[in-house]
Protein backbone atom coordinates (compact mmCIF):
# COMPACT_ATOMS: atom_id res chain seq x y z
CA UNK A 1 0.00 0.00 0.00
CA UNK A 2 1.24 3.48 -0.88
CA UNK A 3 0.65 6.27 1.64
CA UNK A 4 0.03 9.67 0.10
CA UNK A 5 0.33 13.25 1.29
CA UNK A 6 -2.77 14.60 2.99
CA UNK A 7 -1.87 18.28 2.51
CA UNK A 8 -1.71 19.01 -1.22
CA UNK A 9 -3.04 21.18 -4.02
CA UNK A 10 -2.40 18.68 -6.82
CA UNK A 11 -3.06 14.96 -6.85
CA UNK A 12 -0.87 14.44 -9.89
CA UNK A 13 1.88 16.45 -11.56
CA UNK A 14 3.61 15.63 -14.84
CA UNK A 15 6.56 17.10 -16.75
CA UNK A 16 6.22 17.06 -20.51
CA UNK A 17 6.97 18.46 -23.94
CA UNK A 18 3.67 19.22 -25.63
CA UNK A 19 3.24 18.62 -29.33
CA UNK A 20 0.68 18.20 -32.07
CA UNK A 21 -0.54 14.98 -33.65
CA UNK A 22 -1.68 15.18 -37.27
CA UNK A 23 -3.92 12.34 -38.46
CA UNK A 24 -5.90 11.76 -41.67
CA UNK A 25 -9.60 12.26 -40.93
CA UNK A 26 -10.72 9.31 -43.04
CA UNK A 27 -8.51 6.56 -41.63
CA UNK A 28 -6.37 6.48 -44.77
CA UNK A 29 -2.56 6.47 -44.95
CA UNK A 30 -0.88 9.85 -44.66
CA UNK A 31 0.57 9.86 -48.16
CA UNK A 32 -2.84 9.39 -49.80
CA UNK A 33 -4.82 11.87 -47.68
CA UNK A 34 -5.73 15.50 -48.18
CA UNK A 35 -7.69 16.24 -44.99
CA UNK A 36 -6.02 16.01 -41.58
CA UNK A 37 -7.05 16.63 -37.97
CA UNK A 38 -4.75 18.19 -35.36
CA UNK A 39 -4.76 17.42 -31.65
CA UNK A 40 -2.51 18.44 -28.76
CA UNK A 41 -0.65 15.50 -27.32
CA UNK A 42 2.10 14.14 -25.11
CA UNK A 43 2.57 10.79 -23.38
CA UNK A 44 2.62 12.34 -19.93
CA UNK A 45 -0.60 14.33 -20.36
CA UNK A 46 -2.18 11.19 -21.83
CA UNK A 47 -1.48 9.59 -18.44
CA UNK A 48 -2.78 12.58 -16.49
CA UNK A 49 -6.03 12.79 -18.48
CA UNK A 50 -7.68 9.92 -16.60
CA UNK A 51 -7.32 11.82 -13.34
CA UNK A 52 -8.20 15.23 -14.77
CA UNK A 53 -11.36 14.03 -16.54
CA UNK A 54 -12.46 12.23 -13.38
CA UNK A 55 -12.09 15.32 -11.24
CA UNK A 56 -8.69 15.14 -9.55
CA UNK A 57 -6.46 18.26 -9.62
CA UNK A 58 -3.60 17.93 -12.13
CA UNK A 59 -0.60 20.16 -12.86
CA UNK A 60 1.47 20.13 -16.08
CA UNK A 61 5.03 21.47 -16.20
CA UNK A 62 6.01 22.31 -19.77
CA UNK A 63 7.26 25.08 -22.02
CA UNK A 64 5.65 27.01 -24.88
CA UNK A 65 6.70 28.93 -27.97
CA UNK A 66 5.86 32.57 -27.28
CA UNK A 67 3.06 34.09 -29.40
CA UNK A 68 2.56 30.83 -31.29
CA UNK A 69 -0.96 29.86 -32.43
CA UNK A 70 0.06 26.22 -31.89
CA UNK A 71 0.92 27.06 -28.28
CA UNK A 72 -2.51 28.68 -27.98
CA UNK A 73 -4.14 25.51 -29.29
CA UNK A 74 -2.20 23.43 -26.76
CA UNK A 75 -3.14 25.69 -23.85
CA UNK A 76 -6.82 25.58 -24.84
CA UNK A 77 -6.64 21.81 -25.01
CA UNK A 78 -5.07 21.50 -21.55
CA UNK A 79 -7.74 23.80 -20.11
CA UNK A 80 -10.44 21.66 -21.73
CA UNK A 81 -8.91 18.65 -20.00
CA UNK A 82 -9.19 20.47 -16.64
CA UNK A 83 -5.41 20.72 -16.24
CA UNK A 84 -3.44 23.57 -14.70
CA UNK A 85 -0.14 24.30 -16.41
CA UNK A 86 2.91 26.46 -16.05
CA UNK A 87 6.19 26.98 -17.83
CA UNK A 88 8.31 29.55 -19.65
CA UNK A 89 7.41 31.19 -22.95
CA UNK A 90 10.36 30.80 -25.30
CA UNK A 91 10.75 33.14 -28.27
CA UNK A 92 10.66 31.34 -31.61
CA UNK A 93 13.62 33.27 -32.93
CA UNK A 94 13.92 33.10 -36.70
CA UNK A 95 11.73 30.87 -38.93
CA UNK A 96 14.18 28.00 -38.25
CA UNK A 97 13.92 28.46 -34.47
CA UNK A 98 11.81 26.78 -31.81
CA UNK A 99 8.45 25.11 -32.37
CA UNK A 100 6.25 22.42 -30.88
CA UNK A 101 6.89 18.90 -32.14
CA UNK A 102 4.65 17.19 -34.70
CA UNK A 103 3.64 13.52 -34.71
CA UNK A 104 2.25 12.56 -38.11
CA UNK A 105 0.24 9.39 -37.54
CA UNK A 106 -1.61 6.87 -39.68
CA UNK A 107 -3.84 4.83 -37.34
CA UNK A 108 -3.80 1.84 -39.68
CA UNK A 109 -6.71 -0.48 -40.35
CA UNK A 110 -7.12 -4.24 -40.38
CA UNK A 111 -3.98 -5.79 -41.83
CA UNK A 112 -2.41 -2.36 -42.47
CA UNK A 113 -0.40 -1.45 -39.39
CA UNK A 114 -0.11 2.04 -37.90
CA UNK A 115 2.75 4.32 -38.94
CA UNK A 116 4.03 7.29 -36.95
CA UNK A 117 6.60 9.88 -38.03
CA UNK A 118 7.99 12.05 -35.22
CA UNK A 119 9.12 15.45 -36.52
CA UNK A 120 10.94 16.98 -33.55
CA UNK A 121 13.30 19.48 -35.21
CA UNK A 122 13.51 22.64 -33.09
CA UNK A 123 11.34 21.11 -30.34
CA UNK A 124 10.85 23.74 -27.64
CA UNK A 125 10.33 21.08 -24.98
CA UNK A 126 14.02 20.20 -25.22
CA UNK A 127 14.75 23.45 -23.35
CA UNK A 128 12.87 22.47 -20.17
CA UNK A 129 15.13 23.53 -17.32
CA UNK A 130 14.77 23.30 -13.56
CA UNK A 131 15.82 26.96 -13.19
CA UNK A 132 12.51 28.00 -14.80
CA UNK A 133 10.42 26.49 -11.98
CA UNK A 134 10.09 27.17 -8.25
CA UNK A 135 10.36 23.67 -6.79
CA UNK A 136 9.69 24.82 -3.24
CA UNK A 137 6.43 26.41 -4.38
CA UNK A 138 5.40 23.30 -6.32
CA UNK A 139 6.28 20.63 -3.78
CA UNK A 140 6.08 22.43 -0.42
CA UNK A 141 3.76 25.45 -0.64
CA UNK A 142 1.32 23.82 -3.07
CA UNK A 143 2.03 20.15 -2.48
CA UNK A 144 1.77 17.16 -4.82
CA UNK A 145 0.71 13.60 -4.06
CA UNK A 146 2.29 11.86 -7.08
CA UNK A 147 4.88 13.14 -9.55
CA UNK A 148 4.76 11.17 -12.80
CA UNK A 149 7.81 11.09 -15.04
CA UNK A 150 8.41 9.21 -18.27
CA UNK A 151 11.49 8.14 -20.13
CA UNK A 152 10.42 10.24 -23.11
CA UNK A 153 10.93 13.57 -21.38
CA UNK A 154 13.73 12.01 -19.34
CA UNK A 155 15.77 11.27 -22.46
CA UNK A 156 14.65 14.07 -24.78
CA UNK A 157 17.72 16.26 -24.20
CA UNK A 158 20.48 16.73 -21.61
CA UNK A 159 18.46 19.63 -20.18
CA UNK A 160 15.26 17.61 -19.77
CA UNK A 161 17.21 14.68 -18.32
CA UNK A 162 18.61 16.93 -15.62
CA UNK A 163 15.16 18.51 -15.15
CA UNK A 164 13.57 15.13 -14.43
CA UNK A 165 16.41 14.13 -12.13
CA UNK A 166 16.06 17.32 -10.08
CA UNK A 167 12.26 16.92 -9.91
CA UNK A 168 12.66 13.35 -8.67
CA UNK A 169 15.21 14.35 -6.03
CA UNK A 170 13.03 17.20 -4.75
CA UNK A 171 9.89 15.07 -4.77
CA UNK A 172 11.66 12.37 -2.77
CA UNK A 173 12.92 14.92 -0.26
CA UNK A 174 9.47 16.42 0.29
CA UNK A 175 7.38 13.24 0.54
CA UNK A 176 5.80 13.27 -2.91
CA UNK A 177 5.45 9.79 -4.38
CA UNK A 178 7.18 9.21 -7.72
CA UNK A 179 5.85 7.24 -10.68
CA UNK A 180 8.33 6.46 -13.47
CA UNK A 181 7.30 4.95 -16.82
CA UNK A 182 10.58 4.07 -18.56
CA UNK A 183 9.28 4.47 -22.15
CA UNK A 184 12.51 3.63 -23.99
CA UNK A 185 13.08 5.24 -27.40
CA UNK A 186 16.21 4.15 -29.25
CA UNK A 187 16.55 7.42 -31.18
CA UNK A 188 16.60 9.42 -27.92
CA UNK A 189 19.34 7.23 -26.46
CA UNK A 190 21.68 7.34 -29.46
CA UNK A 191 25.13 8.40 -28.26
CA UNK A 192 23.91 8.87 -24.66
CA UNK A 193 23.62 5.30 -23.37
CA UNK A 194 26.04 5.60 -20.44
CA UNK A 195 24.72 9.01 -19.37
CA UNK A 196 21.06 8.03 -19.58
CA UNK A 197 21.55 4.65 -17.91
CA UNK A 198 22.98 6.49 -14.87
CA UNK A 199 20.15 9.06 -14.81
CA UNK A 200 17.39 6.50 -15.28
CA UNK A 201 18.93 4.27 -12.62
CA UNK A 202 18.93 7.11 -10.10
CA UNK A 203 15.33 8.10 -10.87
CA UNK A 204 14.24 4.45 -10.65
CA UNK A 205 16.05 4.07 -7.32
CA UNK A 206 13.92 6.80 -5.71
CA UNK A 207 10.65 5.91 -7.47
CA UNK A 208 7.66 4.38 -5.69
CA UNK A 209 5.98 3.08 -8.87
CA UNK A 210 7.96 1.61 -11.78
CA UNK A 211 6.31 0.84 -15.11
CA UNK A 212 7.78 -0.59 -18.28
CA UNK A 213 7.61 -3.35 -20.84
CA UNK A 214 10.26 -5.99 -21.35
CA UNK A 215 12.27 -3.76 -23.72
CA UNK A 216 12.13 -0.81 -21.32
CA UNK A 217 13.47 -2.73 -18.34
CA UNK A 218 16.22 -4.39 -20.38
CA UNK A 219 17.48 -1.38 -22.32
CA UNK A 220 16.97 1.38 -19.72
CA UNK A 221 17.99 -0.47 -16.56
CA UNK A 222 19.81 -3.59 -17.74
CA UNK A 223 17.26 -6.00 -16.25
CA UNK A 224 17.16 -9.41 -17.92
CA UNK A 225 13.70 -10.29 -19.18
CA UNK A 226 11.72 -12.31 -21.71
CA UNK A 227 12.21 -11.73 -25.40
CA UNK A 228 10.85 -8.38 -26.54
CA UNK A 229 8.09 -8.21 -29.10
CA UNK A 230 4.88 -9.30 -27.37
CA UNK A 231 4.48 -12.69 -29.09
CA UNK A 232 2.86 -15.58 -27.21
CA UNK A 233 2.07 -13.41 -24.22
CA UNK A 234 -0.07 -15.91 -22.30
CA UNK A 235 2.72 -18.48 -22.39
CA UNK A 236 5.19 -15.86 -21.14
CA UNK A 237 3.36 -14.82 -17.96
CA UNK A 238 5.82 -16.54 -15.64
CA UNK A 239 8.70 -15.04 -17.60
CA UNK A 240 7.27 -11.56 -17.15
CA UNK A 241 6.79 -12.18 -13.43
CA UNK A 242 10.39 -13.29 -13.20
CA UNK A 243 11.49 -10.08 -14.90
CA UNK A 244 9.48 -7.95 -12.48
CA UNK A 245 10.99 -9.91 -9.61
CA UNK A 246 14.46 -8.96 -10.88
CA UNK A 247 13.39 -5.33 -11.15
CA UNK A 248 12.22 -5.45 -7.54
CA UNK A 249 15.52 -6.97 -6.41
CA UNK A 250 17.46 -4.22 -8.19
CA UNK A 251 15.14 -1.37 -7.10
CA UNK A 252 13.68 -2.37 -3.72
CA UNK A 253 12.68 1.20 -2.81
CA UNK A 254 9.61 0.97 -5.05
CA UNK A 255 6.30 -0.42 -3.83
CA UNK A 256 4.58 -1.08 -7.15
CA UNK A 257 5.92 -2.58 -10.39
CA UNK A 258 3.78 -2.96 -13.50
CA UNK A 259 3.86 -3.97 -17.14
CA UNK A 260 1.24 -4.34 -19.84
CA UNK A 261 0.86 -7.32 -22.14
CA UNK A 262 -0.17 -6.87 -25.75
CA UNK A 263 -0.49 -9.31 -28.63
CA UNK A 264 -1.54 -7.78 -31.94
CA UNK A 265 -3.95 -9.95 -33.92
CA UNK A 266 -4.70 -7.14 -36.36
CA UNK A 267 -4.61 -3.35 -36.19
CA UNK A 268 -8.13 -3.36 -34.76
CA UNK A 269 -7.99 -6.45 -32.56
CA UNK A 270 -5.53 -6.99 -29.73
CA UNK A 271 -5.11 -9.26 -26.74
CA UNK A 272 -4.60 -6.91 -23.79
CA UNK A 273 -3.39 -7.86 -20.32
CA UNK A 274 -1.32 -6.60 -17.40
CA UNK A 275 0.87 -7.71 -14.53
CA UNK A 276 1.34 -5.69 -11.34
CA UNK A 277 3.31 -6.44 -8.20
CA UNK A 278 2.33 -4.56 -5.02
CA UNK A 279 4.71 -5.56 -2.25
CA UNK A 280 4.59 -9.35 -2.45
CA UNK A 281 1.10 -9.55 -3.98
CA UNK A 282 0.70 -10.27 -7.69
CA UNK A 283 -2.17 -8.96 -9.78
CA UNK A 284 -2.26 -10.75 -13.14
CA UNK A 285 -4.82 -9.86 -15.78
CA UNK A 286 -4.69 -12.51 -18.45
CA UNK A 287 -4.84 -11.07 -21.97
CA UNK A 288 -8.39 -10.47 -23.19
CA UNK A 289 -9.55 -9.46 -26.65
CA UNK A 290 -10.22 -5.76 -27.14
CA UNK A 291 -11.35 -3.92 -30.26
CA UNK A 292 -9.04 -1.07 -31.19
CA UNK A 293 -9.96 2.11 -33.02
CA UNK A 294 -6.54 3.73 -32.51
CA UNK A 295 -3.83 2.04 -30.43
CA UNK A 296 -1.78 5.16 -29.63
CA UNK A 297 -2.07 5.99 -25.93
CA UNK A 298 -3.25 2.60 -24.69
CA UNK A 299 -0.23 2.10 -22.48
CA UNK A 300 -0.53 5.65 -21.16
CA UNK A 301 -4.17 4.96 -20.36
CA UNK A 302 -3.15 1.94 -18.30
CA UNK A 303 -0.70 4.01 -16.26
CA UNK A 304 -3.23 6.83 -15.87
CA UNK A 305 -5.94 4.48 -14.64
CA UNK A 306 -3.60 2.75 -12.21
CA UNK A 307 -2.41 6.07 -10.77
CA UNK A 308 -5.99 7.29 -10.43
CA UNK A 309 -6.93 4.16 -8.50
CA UNK A 310 -3.91 4.63 -6.20
CA UNK A 311 -4.82 8.28 -5.64
CA UNK A 312 -8.37 7.25 -4.73
CA UNK A 313 -7.05 4.88 -2.08
CA UNK A 314 -8.69 1.77 -3.55
CA UNK A 315 -7.47 -1.77 -2.80
CA UNK A 316 -4.47 -2.85 -4.88
CA UNK A 317 -6.54 -5.38 -6.86
CA UNK A 318 -8.50 -2.48 -8.34
CA UNK A 319 -5.35 -0.59 -9.35
CA UNK A 320 -4.52 -3.11 -12.07
CA UNK A 321 -8.15 -3.61 -13.09
CA UNK A 322 -8.86 0.11 -13.48
CA UNK A 323 -5.56 0.57 -15.30
CA UNK A 324 -6.32 -2.27 -17.72
CA UNK A 325 -9.79 -0.89 -18.45
CA UNK A 326 -8.52 2.69 -18.82
CA UNK A 327 -5.97 1.50 -21.38
CA UNK A 328 -8.67 -0.39 -23.24
CA UNK A 329 -10.86 2.73 -23.17
CA UNK A 330 -8.05 4.87 -24.61
CA UNK A 331 -7.88 2.63 -27.70
CA UNK A 332 -11.53 3.46 -28.47
CA UNK A 333 -10.76 7.20 -28.81
CA UNK A 334 -9.23 9.02 -31.78
CA UNK A 335 -7.41 11.28 -29.32
CA UNK A 336 -4.20 9.87 -27.84
CA UNK A 337 -5.85 9.99 -24.41
CA UNK A 338 -9.03 8.54 -22.95
CA UNK A 339 -11.81 10.96 -22.00
CA UNK A 340 -13.86 9.06 -19.42
CA UNK A 341 -17.22 10.59 -18.58
CA UNK A 342 -17.18 8.91 -15.17
CA UNK A 343 -15.70 5.92 -13.34
CA UNK A 344 -18.62 3.76 -14.44
CA UNK A 345 -17.58 4.10 -18.09
CA UNK A 346 -14.23 2.50 -17.21
CA UNK A 347 -15.60 -0.15 -14.87
CA UNK A 348 -18.11 -1.23 -17.52
CA UNK A 349 -15.17 -2.06 -19.80
CA UNK A 350 -13.62 -4.17 -17.07
CA UNK A 351 -16.95 -5.96 -16.65
CA UNK A 352 -17.32 -6.52 -20.39
CA UNK A 353 -20.59 -4.61 -20.46
CA UNK A 354 -21.10 -2.57 -23.62
CA UNK A 355 -24.86 -2.19 -23.23
CA UNK A 356 -26.50 1.16 -23.84
CA UNK A 357 -26.60 3.30 -20.69
CA UNK A 358 -29.95 5.06 -20.41
Image (spheres, rainbow, N blue to C red):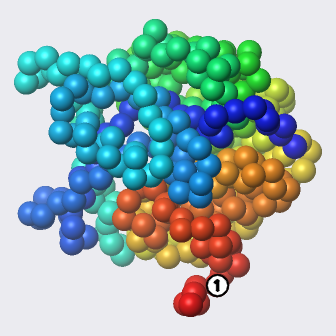
Left or right: residue 269 compared with residue 7: left
Q: In the image shown, does 153 or 308 lie closer to the viewer? A: 308
| Extreme residue in the top direction | 131
Q: Quadrant of the N terminus?
A: top right
Residue drawn at (76%, 23%), measured in percent from left and top? 175
Residue 203 on image: x %, y %: 65, 22
Q: Quadrant of the C terminus?
A: bottom right
Left or right: residue 311 compared with residue 142: right
Q: Report helix, strand or loop for mark 1.
A: loop
Q: Please tell me how many numbered marks the rendered image carries.
A: 1
Residue 166 on image: x %, y %: 58, 14
| Extreme residue in the right direction | 280
| Residue occupied by mark 1 | 353
Left or right: residue 235 compared with residue 87: right
Residue drawn at (26%, 45%), measured in percent from left and top? 73
Q: In the image shown, does 53 or 130 lie closer to the viewer? A: 53
Amino acid sequence: MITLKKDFKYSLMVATSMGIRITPVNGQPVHSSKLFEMQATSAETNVASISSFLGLPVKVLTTFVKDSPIAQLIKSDLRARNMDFEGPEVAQGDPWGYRHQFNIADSGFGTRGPRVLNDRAGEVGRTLNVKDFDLEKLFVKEGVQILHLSGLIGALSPETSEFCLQLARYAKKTGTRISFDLNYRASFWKGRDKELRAIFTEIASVSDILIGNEEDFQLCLGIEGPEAGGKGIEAEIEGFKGMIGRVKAAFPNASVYATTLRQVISTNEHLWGAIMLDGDDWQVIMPRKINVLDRIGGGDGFVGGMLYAILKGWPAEKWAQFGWASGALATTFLTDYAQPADEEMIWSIWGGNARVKR
